[in-house]
């Protein structure tokens, strides 16, 4: 009985539903630029904190700018 209900639910969820909307080229380029911006932000964040992330997994304290021995 559970298998039949699950099968019916899967079939109903996979049926196409007509959508009355229009996405113009500007919307598509806006979505692409948002994805590229998110990816660039993630890369910059990882690059910025790379030494801290690496030190965390190695178990060593991260070297900061104040640890260079200059006054």
Image (cartoon, grey):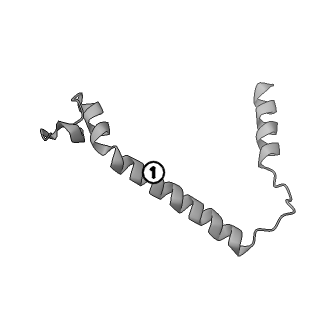
Quarter of the image holding residue 67? top left
The image shows residue 8 at horizontal and vertical percentages of 82, 38
Q: Residue at x 77, y 25 (%)?
A: 2
The image shows residue 17 at horizontal and vertical percentages of 84, 55
Question: Element at badge 1?
Answer: helix
Q: Going by the image, does 5 lie left or right of 70?
A: right
Q: Residue furthest left?
A: 69
Q: Is residue 29 above or below residue 54?
A: below
Quarter of the image holding residue 5? top right
Q: Which residue is mark 1?
A: 42
In the foreground, 70 or 30: 70
The image shows residue 61 at horizontal and vertical percentages of 23, 30
Q: Is residue 16 above or below residue 6?
A: below
The quarter of the rendered structure image containing the N terminus is: top right
Q: Residue furthest bottom?
A: 25
The image shows residue 35 at horizontal and vertical percentages of 56, 59
Q: Residue furthest front?
A: 71
In the foreground, 36 or 22: 36
Q: Is residue 70 above or below residue 2?
A: below
Q: Residue furthest top?
A: 1
Q: How many numbered circles are shown?
A: 1
The crowding category of the residue bearing disc 1, from other C-alpha atoms within 10 Å (few below 14, some 14 to 19, many at least 20), is few
Q: Residue at x 38, y 47 (%)?
A: 46
Q: Residue at x 69, y 72 (%)?
A: 26
In the foreground, 67 or 57: 67
Q: Residue at x 77, y 37 (%)?
A: 7
């Amino acid at each position: 009985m559970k298998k039949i209900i699950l099968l019916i639910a899967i079939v109903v969820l996979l049926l196409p539903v007509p959508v009355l909307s229009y996405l113009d080229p500007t919307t598509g380029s806006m979505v692409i630029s948002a994805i590229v911006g998110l990816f660039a932000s993630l890369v910059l964040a990882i690059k910025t904190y790379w030494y801290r992330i690496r030190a965390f997994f190695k178990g060593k304290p991260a070297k900061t700018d104040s640890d260079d021995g200059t006054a």
